[in-house]
Amino acid sequence: MAILSILDLAPITEGSHAGESLRHSVELAQHAERWGYHRFWMAEHHNMTGIASAATAVALAYVGAHTKTIRIGAGGIMLPNHAPLIVAEQFGTLAALFPNRVDLGLGRAPGTDGATLRALRRTYESADSFPNDVQELLAYLDDPKPGQAIKAVPGMGSKVPVWILSSSLFGAQLAAHLGLPYAFASHFAPDYLQVALEAYRANFKPSQYLEKPYAMAAINVFAADSEQAAKRLKSSMQLQFIALRQGNPGPLAAPVDDIENRVDPAALAAANHALKYTAMGTAEQVHQYLRDFVAATGVDEVMLTCHAYDHEQRLRSFEIAKDCCFNKENP
């Protein structure tokens, strides 16, 4: 069975604020460390009033300072938004502070809208240089070459493990070509999961970074003491996803018992399709879902995320899920 990790978006709930969300992230990471989760990743999103992890490296420094052993990392940094040297310096700094604990997942999508891209001084065309930017970043994190003029300080020689993240075949093929570990965003983009995994494994080239393919997939988890309680937990994420698709992103809404009667059926169907890969229900149901998911995909690692309104219930979801799968070697 695959090992388990956590993706945290530091959700900002209605009536709350970013400071509280980030403190909740630290508490979740501390619990995850005690429970035996392997990684704790955070993701870069901009202009999202329901997500507090935009300054991902800063948030990870806070988490790292309050944990001891769990790996921390980005899932991911949207590289088109940044100069590779800056990312190398940021994650080189994290690696200097937290040796042998830091991962760097890279995404090609901007992770935001066009107006925000302009505010970041980027364009959609920035993504066209993603393969070259990844290789530039890898070079900054490697041992410096004789005569190398530009060095990441901190960063050079840190060899922070780099992952390629995607929801399409492009990222799978790039990860395979470069011989890097690969993570698929199936928690919100389910359609190409299987074909992307197949393309990654079929085209993988052993490298200085990895001898054989290593694949991870992300899924949502809403676990509770009853199936109805788990369904209610999920409703907050459904409501937020619908609002995002309608161009009205906002804080994470309180859960409801009758979401089918609260929203347009077509909008709910679209949200449910995007959230197809969701482990929901009691401990037995969630564990069985995880076992079936790993059997169907063959992934080496599953990254769980839970956008639940109540922090204690979010902790409980991860606590219930933790007993399923820790017994496989990992990079």
Image (cartoon, helix red, strand yellow):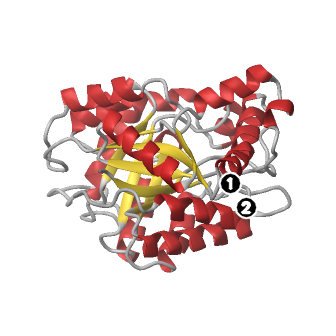
Residue at position x 77%, y 57% from top?
13
Residue located beneath label 2 in the image: 310
Check residue 108 in the rendering and tell me which mark sits there, or answer none.
Answer: none
Residue at position x 33%, y 64% from top?
155
| Residue 133 image offset from top left, x and y in percent | 37, 40
Residue located beneath label 1 in the image: 308
CB under 8 Å between discs 2 and 1: yes
Q: Is residue 179 left or right of residue 39?
A: left
Residue at position x 58%, y 72% from top?
26
SS for dot 1: loop
Q: Residues within 10 Å of mark 2 (few under 14, many from 20)?
A: some
- Between 139 and 239, the residue placed more toward the observer is 239
Position of the C terminus by quadrant:
bottom left
What is the quadrant of residue 243 in the picture?
top right
What is the quadrant of residue 298 in the picture?
top left
Give the amino acid at mark 1. Ala
What is the quadrant of residue 249 in the picture?
top right
What's the distance in space between the residues labelled 2 and 1, CA to CA?
Answer: 6 Å
| Residue 250 image offset from top left, x and y in percent | 79, 45
- Between 79 and 101, the residue placed more toward the observer is 101
Say if residue 124 shows up in the picture: yes
Residue at position x 78%, y 28% from top?
246
Above or below, 143 against 270 in this view is: below
Give the amino acid at mark 2. Asp
Say if residue 183 shows up in the picture: no
- Between 30 and 316, the residue placed more toward the observer is 316
| Residue 192 image offset from top left, x and y in percent | 43, 24
Above or below, 328 against 23 in this view is: above
| Residue 271 image offset from top left, x and y in percent | 67, 30
Q: In this view, does 47 lie to the left or right of 224?
A: right
